Image (spheres, helix red, strand yellow):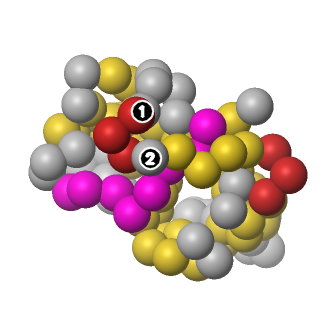
Amino acid sequence: MGLLRPRPGRLPRGRHRPAPHLVPAVEHGQLRLLDNLQPGDILYWGSRSGSYHVAVYVGGGNYVGAQNSSTGVVERSLDWDPPSGAVRIL
């Protein structure tokens, strides 16, 4: 598992775009243990082959991610919704 690379959607201009489908790009990152995170590490939720959400670790046990269209981007504790894993971009 490595960095997750978005696959662009195909909607007409002016239409709301859904979140891109994420596919693994193994050659660009290293798996990280959740107890050894550094700011900038990418957190993921789901399986290594099919993540459904990603966020960025910002340090101090917190991450920043886009929750949904009504909540927007938020900072949360790792305890609020523990990720499945993490990737460090090289």
Q: Nearer the viewer, residue 17 or 31?
A: 31
Viewport quadrant of the N terminus: bottom right
Q: Amino acid at mark 1?
A: Leu
Residue 23 in sight from this viewpoint: yes
Per the rendering, the mark at residue 25 is none
Q: Looking at the picture, does residue 65 appear above or below residue 2?
A: above
- Residue 80 versus residue 63 in the image, above or below: below
8 vs 36, left or right, is: right
First to last magenta residue range: 81-88
Residue 33 circle label: 2
Bin the neighbour count of mark 1 within 10 Å (Cα to Cα): few under 14, some 14-19, many 20 and up.
Answer: some
**Which sits in the foreground, 21 or 80?**
80
Quarter of image, res 30: top right
Residue assigned mark 1: 37
- Residue at 18% across, 39% down: 77
Q: Name the residue rendered at 40%, 34% in the picture.
A: 36
Percent x, y of residue 80: 14, 51
**82 left or right of 56?**
left
Q: Mark 2 Cα within 10 Å, few/some/many (few <14, many 20+)?
A: few
- Quarter-of-image position of residue 75: top left
Q: Is residue 6 visible?
A: no
Say which of 44 and 36 sits in front: 36
Task: Check if mark 1's residue and mark 2's residue have beta carbons within 8 Å.
Answer: yes
Residue at position x 38%, y 25% in the image: 58
Above or below for 88 versus 58 = below
Question: Three-letter amino acid code at disc 2?
Answer: Leu
